[in-house]
Image (spheres, rainbow, N blue to C red):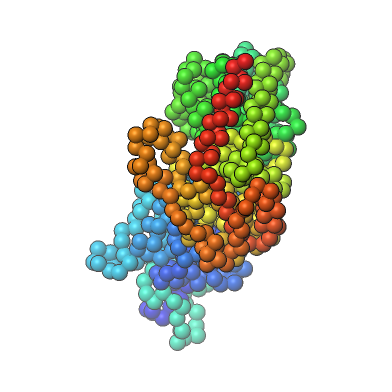
Amino acid sequence: MSLSSSNLHTAWAQLFLLHLARAGVARLFMSPGSRSTPLALAAAAERLLGARNELRSAVIVDERAAAFAALGAARATGEPTALLCTSGTAPAHWMPAVIEADAQRLPLILISADRPWEEQEIGAAQTIDQVKLFGPFVRGHFELGLPDAAPEALRSIPRLAAQVVARARSPEPGPVHLNARFRKPLEPVERSFAEPEDWETLVAGLAARAPTHFSKPARARCRDEVERLAERCAAQANGVIFCGPAALPCDPDEAAAAMVELSLATGYPVLAESASGVRFGAASGPERRIAALEPLRALERLSPALVLEFGGAPISRAHTSALARTPETERHVIADFARAPAEALAASVVVDDCWPFARALAKRRAALGAPTSEWFERWADADVRARHIADEEVARLPALSEAATARALLAALPSKATLVLGNSGPIREVDFWCPPASRALRVLHQRGANGIDGLIAGAAGAAGTNRGSRRPTALLLGDLSALHDLGGFATARGLDAPLLIVLLNNGGGRIFEELPLGRAGAHAEALRSHFVAEQQLDFEPIAALFGHPYARATDLDSLPALFSEALGREGCTLVEVKVAPKDSIARRAGAMARMMESLSK
C-alpha cells in the first residue's frame, strides 16, 4: 500500500500534538504555511484521534511576532508554550525570541516543519538546512522524523512529545527545537478502500495511553549554605539585601513576604528593583522594610559590609558601580539558576529557589538572636528622604513626563494586574520614581538579552493567558520599541482581557543621551541622527489600522481616566503620552543631585 493513499501523515501529526498537550503544553502559536499542513490541521481539529483537543492554538502571520507572543505566554505562566511554522526561512524569524528565551530561561517548544531528506541540497524551494538551526541557544534538538508506519516509529511519538517538554522544563528551563519532516501529499486523502490500515489499531492504542512521565529532579535545600550565611549575617550587622530581576514567574505577595521576613531577621534593608517581583506585594508597603532604589547611591556613604543579592543580574547601574568602587564588600549571590557575578567578586554563589531559601535563611538567622536596629534605621531614614525628594520633583511641574506617567500607571493598576516593562527607559523610570506598594502586581520584563524587540507581541501573549479572568495587563514602552514591533499590534487583536499599551513618545532612543557619547557633546549631530533616530510617526492611524482604540493624553490630569477606561475595556487600547525629549534626563539628574545632597548631611 503506498503512502499516497494513506492518512498516516494526519494520524502522525495528531498523535504528536495529543501527547504534547498531555505532557503539559496548553498553548500553540502558529504561522500559516504549506509544509506544516499536517500539524496545522491537527491543531485546528476539535478532536485528536478521538480525544478532545486540549491545545489552544492562535494563528499569527508574522513568525517573529508569533515567537514573541509565545515568549510572553511562557513568561507569564512559566509553562512550556509551543510554536509552529513552515520550512525555509520561516523558523529563522524566531531567532531573537529564542535567544531571549535562552537567556531568560523560558520554556519554548519550537516545531519547524521541514522538507524530506531527498529535497535537501538540490535547490528545492523553501528548503534550508534546519538541523540545529538555533545552535547553542536551545536546550536540545530533536527530529520528529518522516511519518512511518513501523510500530517502533509510532511508539516513539508519545515518548518524544514528553521528552521534548521535559527538556524544556528541566534541569534548566529554555527553548527546545523539534524538526518535523513531511512528504507530499500533506493533506488528508480520500481513501478508495474501507478496511483499516495496519497501523490504525496501534495508533488508537497509543492515543488512549497516558503520557510518559518525566520527573523533575528535586532541588535539595542548601542547608549548609543556609547555616553558613546565617552565621555571616549574625556576625555582620551592616548588611543590605538586594533583589534583581526575577528569573521565574512568582507570586508578588509571597516574594515580598519572604524578603520582609529576612529583613526582620537580619536587620538589613531590602532594595528591590521593579522587575524583582518583590517591590509590589502585600508586605511591601506596610512593613516599610522594602526601600526605594535610590538609597543605593548611598552604598559608599553608609558602607555596607555585606550584601545578599537575590535573583538575576542587576539592572541598576548604581548598584553595580557602587560594588565596583567598594570591592571589600562581602557579597553573596542567591539565584534560581547559576550565574557568575561579573560586576564584582562574590564570596559565594548559591543556586537555589530564591524565596524558599530566603525564608529558610530568615528562620535560621532569627534563631541566632535578634539584630540591632541602628543600621536599618539609618537606611530607612535615607529611604524616606529619597522618596520625599522624588515626590517633590514629580509634583514640581504639571506637564506630562515619563516620571508622572509611570506613577499614574502604577496607581491605576488594580491588584493582581500584570505590568510589562519595556527595556531602556521605561524600566528605569519605574525603578527610579515608583516606590514599593502593597498592591500585588505581577511585573514581567525582557531582561535576558535586553532587546527592545517584540515587546508588544510579548505583552499580547502574556495578556492572552488571562483569558476568562479579565485581569488587565499594561505595557509601558517607548516610541522606538513600538516602531520596532508594529506587527505586535496585529498580535494584540482579538484579546478578551484588557491590554493597555502606554506609549511614552519622547522622540527616539533617548537612552543614548545618557551614555558617555551623549554627555560628551562633541558628537551631538551624530548622536541625534544615528543613535536617537527620532521618527516622525503618527500612531493614531497605526492603532486604527489594527482596530485598536487610541487616545492621546493632553495633560497629567487626563491620565487616570484614560488608564481606568482602557483597563476596564476588553482588548487592546493604545494611549500615547508625548513628553519633552530631554525631560527625563534633566528631571532624574536634578532629583539625584538633591538626594545626594540630602544623604550627605
Residue at the extreme left = 122
Q: Nearer the viewer, residue 569 or 9?
A: 569
Quadrant into which the C terminus falls: top right
Q: Position of residue 321 (x, y in %)?
A: 48, 25
Residue at figure coordinates x 66%, y 45% from the top left: 408
Residue at figure coordinates x 54%, y 39% from the top left: 584
Residue at the extreme top = 235
Residue at the extreme bottom = 192
Quadrant into which the N terminus falls: bottom left
Residue at figure coordinates x 34%, y 55% from the top left: 131
As drawn, 198 above or below 406: below
Does residue 265 appear to the left or right of 176 in the view shown? right
Q: Nearer the viewer, residue 373 or 555?
A: 555
Q: Position of residue 130 (x, y in %)?
A: 34, 58
Q: Is residue 166 in view? A: no
Q: Is residue 195 in view? A: yes
Q: Position of residue 181 (x, y in %)?
A: 38, 65
Residue at the extreme right = 286
As drawn, 23 above or below 494: above
Residue at figure coordinates x 50%, y 20% from the top left: 347
Does residue 118 appear to the left or right of 237 in the view shown? left
Q: Position of residue 440 (x, y in %)?
A: 70, 42
In which image quadrant can residue 279 be found? top right
